[in-house]
Amino acid sequence: MKKYFFSLLISFLLTGLLPVSVSAQESRTKPIKTTPKLIVGIVADQMRYDYLTRFWEHYGDGGFKRMVSEGFNCKNNHYNYAPTTTGPGHASIYTGTTPSVHGVIGNNWYDKESGQVVYCASDERYTSVGTSAGTGKMSPHWMTVSTVTDELRLFTQKRGKVIALALKDRGAVLPGGHMANAAYWYNGGLDGDWISSSYYMDELPKWVRDFNASDAVEKYKKTWNTLKNINVYLESGPDNNPYEGAFSGESAPVFPHDLPKLWESNGQFDLLRNTAYGNSMTTDFALAALEGEDLGKDAIPDFLAISYSSTDYVGHQFGVNSKEIQDTYLRLDEDLARLLKQLDQKVGKGEYLVFLSSDHGAVDVPAYLKDQKLPAGYMDSQSMSAKFREFMSYTFGDAKLIRNYSNAQFFLDHDVIRSLDMELEDVQYKIAQELLGYEGISRVFTGHQMETNEYSRGVPYIIQNGYNQKRSGDVLLVLDPAVVYYSRTGSTHGSPYIYDTHVPLLFFGKGIPQGSTTERTEIPDIAPTISALLGMSFPNGTTGTPIEAVLD
């Protein structure tokens, strides 16, 4: 009788007929009561956190403000590694770990095995789909671990769809993961089409061919003027200033930008990337994907990964304090409102889950900072190289010890060092000590330091998280704050400093509480948070931690 009662009790507990107490940890990892029909991951390329607050009064109610007021805002969200660039950023958001684990150590890097510089999404084993150009020869093979999108495919026995898209190929390929149904990116030039790779498909589906055949992109070949009266754009600097780069054919980098007039001298359809219209084109294509792929139509969750790339192109050309960047974010806000409205209608209000973050921030134009009497500057590559060559010749003679310098890292020839009976650690140390004395260089780390120490905070911690033992260099440079290798117009990124690491993180939709936190969160926390919400396995290289406040 006791055995029967015990069995009955267990049965009731398992079927939810009796209340059961669970620990706080267990409750945080349980799936939400009703799984969202669609997860939408949004990455706004080069979005600093302060773009959310600086332009707040100009945003409408349906975009950023809706996500903040109805969702959860992680106000102290950071990248915990460097280099803070696009490829590593997208990989880290979706894998839940850092370059030290997922292997994407830059947009491009020197491959020690082949002796060649490789691109983070390139793969010559595949062919382009949708174009005769080589711009579709892509796959995620350089990423060595699974993504949250891969785990969704595994969890649903591949019944849940994953579609990824961006103007940039790496902004689609890496978020899509290894098992995506499709990844699409923009091919500019003469065509202005969306394309893919034979890694995913043999031919474009009909909805993509129809989209390319329409005037969906051509309609943006028009003048780019400000969304609102430019005189109310008080949150950015003067329109005409020496810190911005003009389009080819323009006498000054000022509104309005006559795109039809500038068309031929600026790469034709490539020109649209460097305008706010690139984000609108991306939204148009995302909505076509929502419809064409029947995303979010049943109880099995799908995933739509969207990366807005034009925010980065505009930032690089015009800088973070430009009227162009302000207008780009006001227009992106409208695109987000349009996207959310369509998700309400097509998937159902409260039936989908969205997160929004960025792949990195950006520094204010150093020339502008210098004029404001702030410490900033540009590295003199020529004088640095001449001085360094002289040191190498004096110290090591004619031995050719340097194989490559890229991404602020020196790659040494280990075979030559061994043949000369030199100790690798000693060579690394001597080079590091020399470079530390150069103007503009703040710190220098060696591969030996990265491999033998365990840093827990500050710049060393950030550099170590970006160091991959099999792929990174032997000597790693960190420039002074606001000192860059870049042109004197426009903004850039890549450093371990706060202007590059502090980016937004918003959660919105099904299962998400309303609120905010100023507790520190880190980019690798995103993927395990989404996994915990869905009750599925974390990506297999995860080093991040689910964000408790989002799961409570």
Image (spheres, grey):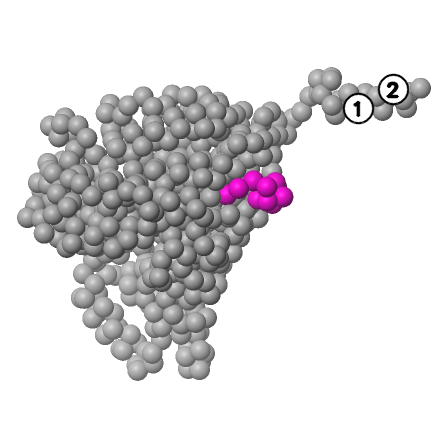
- Up the image or down, 134 lies above or below 268; here it is below
Look at 28% across and 23% down and name the residue there.
60
Relative to 504, say whether 491 is above or below.
Answer: below
- Give the magenta part as a residue range: 153-162
Left or right: residue 354 versus residue 29 is left
Could you tell me residue 376's position as x and y percent? 19, 48
Graded by Cα atoms within 10 Å as few (under 14), some (14 to 19) or many (20 or more), the crowding at tag 1 reads: few
Q: Is residue 356 visible to the viewer in this orientation of the structure?
A: yes
Quarter-of-image position of residue 360: top left
Please, what is the three-letter code of the amino acid marked with disc 1? Ser
Q: Nearer the viewer, residue 379 or 222?
A: 222
- Which residue position is annotated with label 1? 11
Residue 139 visible in the current orientation = no
- Residue farthest toward the right in the current orientation of the protein: 1
Indicate the position of residue 287 as horizontal and vertical percent values: 39, 36
Residue tagged 2: 5
Front one among 394 and 194: 194
Q: Is residue 133 above or below residue 36?
A: below
Residue under the image location 45 percent in, 28 percent down: 346
What residue is drawn where x is 31% and y is 21%?
A: 61
Q: Secondary structure at mark 2?
A: helix
Q: Earlier in the sequence, mark 2 or mark 1?
A: 2
User: Percent position (x, y) of residue 526?
Assistant: 47, 38
Task: Say which quarter of the image contains residue 324.
Answer: top left
Q: How many marks?
A: 2
Q: Quadrant of the N terminus?
A: top right
Q: Main secondary structure of the magenta part?
A: loop
Q: Residue at x 61, y 27 (%)?
A: 27
Q: Residue furthest left?
A: 251
Q: Is residue 526 magenta?
A: no
For the residue carrying disc 2, how many other residues have a C-alpha within 10 Å: few (<14), some (14-19), or many (20+)?
A: few
Q: Is disc 1 placed on a helix, strand or loop?
A: helix
